[in-house]
Amino acid sequence: MLYLEDFVAGQKHVSGKVRVDPDAIKAFAAQFDPQPFHLDEDAARGSFFGGLAASGWHTASLTMRLLVESDFRPAGGIIGTRADELKWPRPVRPGDELHVESEVLEVRPSSSRPGQGFVKSRSTTLNQNGEPVQVLVMNLMVQSRSAKAERG
Amino acid sequence: MLYLEDFVAGQKHVSGKVRVDPDAIKAFAAQFDPQPFHLDEDAARGSFFGGLAASGWHTASLTMRLLVESDFRPAGGIIGTRADELKWPRPVRPGDELHVESEVLEVRPSSSRPGQGFVKSRSTTLNQNGEPVQVLVMNLMVQSRSAKAERG
């Protein structure tokens, strides 16, 4: 459990890995992003992507799972309030194996919520070749240790 | 089909609606964001959220589906390259009914990719009370009509 006081700019952590199978790409797309280049190899060949590619929201969701399952454990959970940046520099392809490398950028107490604060972190999702497929700069709400002590 | 030339700042469009059932919240969380406040009513009561709440990535994914199923049809598909803003001002609760209201903010040709350009749009996801649950400012890559003409 990491409280606000435990976070310092520059801290880094690395997640485990997840393999992205073609069936997972299509299943996510069928539910949330039903466009031909996420659903069907043949249709994808003639598209901007030139082949089947995962939805960016699938990549974002897998990134979240990797973070939740990693040893990055802010007190109260991983609660994002706002992303300052979210980009997908290259597509995720069937068979890609992803992991997430994160770095704390900034730590500050909340002015409106006593006992809470914000941790800004950059999480870069990389494929098996070390190429970034997503960059996410997120503001997380984190409980301070003092607040916990007050509550007993 | 809307080409780059068809987009103008200020254009607005409204999506259909989707209802968010508790089972959908838990199923998404089990797959992508397995934290107690997204998975279990009892555990959620003692959390920051004070009750079951959808993962922000679930809200983002449902927003994408509403956009894909709406009459917002850029040529080549809805292809986001970068979000300049993504925030969740309040949680999505079981039973909430969401829709998306979007506005084109900016249209500009790509300097590196001839025949392509970018449409920046703000998509606000609202619940049944008209309260925003997500604000997304996204840069979409859109094909120009001239590029299509050249390709025949």
Image (spheres, coloured by chain):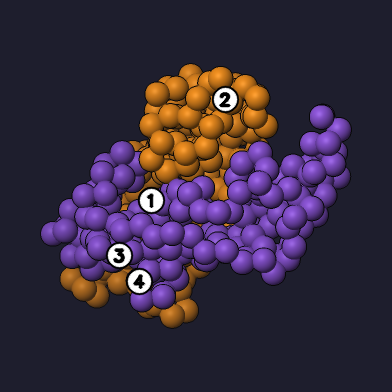
Chain colours: A orange, B purple
Whether tag 4 and tag 3 are in contact, CB under 8 A, the answer is yes
View extreme (bottom): residue: A112
Q: Is residue A52 left or right of residue B52?
A: right
Looking at the rendered structure, whether the residues under marks 3 and 1 are on a common chain is answered as yes
Residue at the disc numbered 1: B58
Task: Characterize the local packing of mark 4: few (<14), some (14-19) or many (20 or more) Cα atoms within 10 angstroms.
Answer: few
To which chain does the residue with label 4 belong?
Answer: B
Residue A135, x across and y down, in percent: 59, 43
Query: Closer to the observer: label 3 or label 2?
Result: 2
Looking at the rendered structure, whether the residues under marks 1 and 4 are on a common chain is answered as yes
Image mark for residue B33: none
Residue at (38% x, 32% y) in the render: A27
Amino acid, disc 2: Ala
Residue at (35% x, 41% y) in the render: B32
Image mark for residue B128: 4
Query: Closer to the observer: label 3 or label 1?
Result: 3
Residue B131 at least partly seen: yes
Residue A59, x across and y down, in percent: 49, 38
Amino acid, disc 3: Asp
Amino acid, disc 1: His
Q: How many marks?
A: 4
To which chain does the residue with label 1 belong?
Answer: B
CA separation in Å, label 2 and label 1? 26 Å
CA separation in Å, label 3 and label 2? 35 Å
SS class, disc 3: loop
Task: Characterize the local packing of mark 1: few (<14), some (14-19) or many (20 or more) Cα atoms within 10 angstroms.
Answer: many
Residue B92: name its quadrant: bottom left
